[in-house]
Image (tube, rainbow, N blue to C red):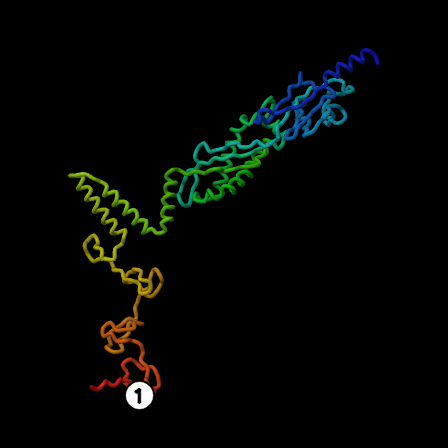
Amino acid sequence: MGIWDKVKNEALNQFIEVIEWLDDSKETILYRFPVHGQEIKNGAQLIVRESQSAVFVYSGQVADVFGPGKYTIDGGNTPILSKLGAWMHGFNSPFKAEVYFVNTKQFTDMKWGTSNPIMLRDDDFGIVRLRAFGAYSMKVADPSTFVKEVAGTNAHFETDDIEGQLKRAIVTEFSDAIGEMKIPALDLAAQYKEIGEAIRDKINTDFKGYGLEVTKFYVENVSLPKEVEEAMDRRASMGALGDAQKYAQFQAADAMVEAAKNEGGGAGLGAGLGAGFAVGNQMANAFGGGGQQQDAAGGQGSSQTVACPNCNKPNSSTAKFCAECGGKMEIAKVPCVKCGAELREGAKFCSECGSSQEKQKCTKCEAELAPGAKFCAECGESSVAEEPTE
């Protein structure tokens, strides 16, 4: 070997490089390896770790993408060399290329939220305005597309550089999805998981063009305007009471307590008395007393209530069946077996004469006797007991 060959080999050996990248920030998506003069020498070592991809860009175009592993940049095991035209003379001349490391791990706990309320039509409350927020996880699914469409020639690209654009896309898809699903406002909390899955599918359709993929999407909260939440609270309170009439009674009682707390003299006393009368009328209407209620013109009172003969619950006097148990309100009448007074069917004693209403039997043949019968219809035996002689 001549002296010039020896010098040449030593010169080439000092250019052998190790191309690798360790992420310290945990938020970096793309990093351009600083190659001096963009010249990569023959025999350079390329180390790509798990959750990384190395993208070689030559003459402004993506030449090759390397997954996790260790590679030697030469003409033997590197497909990139077959695509480049710089090493055509025994691979002794360096070629110029850019090396981008792309972080393919999942970037978690990325936040999203609606900056302005979303207008929706709801069956229960009409038009409502919703606000929502949550979190999502995403990763680079296609490093080549990401370099071409998003990162470009940036030497350092972090999640903050694209997060704003991703948030706007998410809010747009969220508004579209929740409008299509037509979930009532009262049922939104029970549908967070279904909403998240529907939105993730829609978002991935858009993110695919960026080389990105949303792996997880969470809806943490969907909030309604204050007035709608108050209406929901009132409805929940009525549901807890279980009876609208009882709720009205409860409100009337509260109003009377508040009126009783109002102290003052003179005009204040008169106003308090007026409020007291008004509350009294309100309570009379709310509690629905059993007596007659005069109308505004002072005419006939409203219909009275009568107790159900079966369950004893009050019902309108004109009702034919009980609103509580469904029993018949009309009471059958039967005559007393002795004095003929009208009695309720099934009565055991007469309310007029006190006589037992149980059916009598013939003392001879034990056949049932008709009420007031003096002789048995079967054997003709007298059914009238002989009066004792003194």
* Quadrant including the N terminus: top right
Identify the residue shown where x is 25% and y is 78%.
338
The x, y position of residue 111, in whole percent, is: 51, 32
Q: Which residue is mark 1?
A: 381
Identify the residue shown where x is 78% and y is 14%.
8
Amino acid under label 1?
Glu
The x, y position of residue 16, in whole percent, is: 72, 19
Horizontally, residue 159 falls left or right of residue 254, namely right
Identify the residue shown where x is 53% and y is 34%.
136
Horizontally, residue 166 falls left or right of residue 305, namely right
Horizontally, residue 121 falls left or right of residue 349, namely right
The residue positioned farthest toward the right in the image shown: 1
Q: Is residue 182 visible?
A: no
Q: Secondary structure at mark 1?
A: loop
Identify the residue shown where x is 76% and y is 24%.
75
Query: Is 186 located above or below residue 84 in the figure?
Result: below
When asked about the image quadrant of residue 225, the answer is top left
When asked about the image quadrant of residue 23, the answer is top right
Q: Is residue 101 visible?
A: yes
The x, y position of residue 162, in whole percent, is: 54, 28
* Quadrant including the C terminus: bottom left
